[in-house]
Image: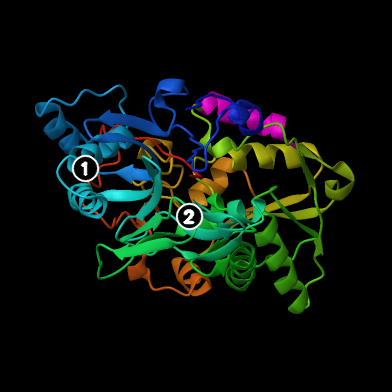
Amino acid sequence: MHEKCGVVGISLDGLAALNGPQGIGHIRYPTEGGVNECCAQPFSVSFKSGSLGLAHNGNLVNADEVRDTLAALGHAFTSAGDTEVIAHDLARNLLEADLVRAVKSTMDRIHGSYSLTIMHDETVLGVRDPQGNRPLVLGELDDGYVLASESAAVDTLDGELIRDVKPGELVVLSPDGAGYDSYQLIDAPQTAHCFFEHVYFARPDSILDDELVYDVRRELGRQLWEESGIETDVVMPVPDSGRAFASGYAEAATEAGAGTEFAEGLMKNRYVGRTFIMPTQDERERAVRLKLNPIKSTIEGRTVTIIDDSVVRGTTSTQLVSLLRDAGAEEIHMRVGSPPIVAPCYLGIDMASRDELIAADRTVEEIEAEIEADSLAYLSIDAITEALNRSRADLCLGCVTGEYPYDVEGEATDRDVTRPSVGRETSHGD
């Protein structure tokens, strides 16, 4: 077991000492519990008939209930996270059942979003929740098989993507690397894929649910022009996640005869991480200034359209408009490749409370005035469903509608309500 905090490439410098034909790994960003090694995954549990390690991408909505039940049976927990709850429940089931039945029993007990990779003795397996909220893919290598949150990880290993793990499916990799077995343990009437994976979280070179993320984002950019395009001297992305949206937007503008130039007007400091997932508001505001620097020759004396993938807290948008004004932009029009985020996420993305969400209690016009843009427009939900080729019923749109695929205790329309106090471990990458 190797656990460490920090940048991935640096933190993994101890892997060479870990020998063995199987393994699981995990990259975590904290939505609760802070940045410390006691919350790092995979979680390992030893029990009478063996041991297991478990990594989790997602968030349970009934973790407290399951934890209390297990604690009453004598289980002791070392963290506040829901991942450890899953590991303990599975370990208990393995005392009384074979691997497949034990996993099924755990899936019947836990509710919420989860894509799991598990190592039990010499066997690696993957599990995706019945509604497929978080991604999980299966790939083939020269000497075996691999499970990962995104296909880009399979590409990095020179592997070949086989397919997505299906919602409600258990995939068991053969210890000798010769093949895998599939068990469809639960069939749900509909899926609840998180649309925000395609908008923000996934790498643009990944394939999710048979769609290349880059192509989806370009199509969303085209839809953005169709819905709210405005002719300006230059259109530019917020790097890096806004780039594909801006490319599609600019292409659609050109096809419509607009004399708008696509340009990179903001340079990114690649040593500053994603501001959205930083734990405090002060860190997020400071990081925006450190992360982005305007190119004055592209901006000065010109009208500008700036394209971002999403606006959650408004931190980046407010700072960006200020940066562009200081660089001499005559007009600044902001276009956003997703709908307004009006409600918290309970299924694994760090949108903790309505108080933090700029669109929770403001109109688009009020947000426009607050960030001091000349105009602001968001993409519609209909454009999202069209680009993803899915109905609303098969997507999780809770953060933009307030309607969730699972009942969430404590959820209400009161603007003061915050996320229920459930421990959780969240990641992007197994």
Looking at the rendering, the stretch of residues picked out in magenta corresponds to: 281-292
Numbered disc in front, either 2 or 1: 1
Q: Which residue is mark 2?
A: 196
Mark 2 is on which residue type? Phe
Secondary structure category for the residue under label 1: helix
Task: From the viewer's side, name the closer residue of 60 and 400.
Answer: 60
Task: Give the spatial CA distance, label 2 vs label 1.
Answer: 35 Å
Q: Which residue is mark 1?
A: 94
Residue 411 placed where, x, y %? 23, 45
Q: Position of residue 150 (x, y in %)?
A: 54, 54
Q: Is residue 374 magenta?
A: no
- Could you say which quadrant of the image residue 44 lies in? top left
Instruction: Tell me if mark 1 has few (under 14), some (14-19) or many (20+) residues whose alpha carbon lies within 10 angstroms of its own.
Output: many
Indicate yes or no whether the magenta region holds residue 282: yes
Q: Is residue 166 left or right of residue 13?
A: left
Residue at the spot 40% in from the left edge and 26% down from the top edge? 39
Magenta-drawn stretch, dominant element (helix, strand or loop):
helix
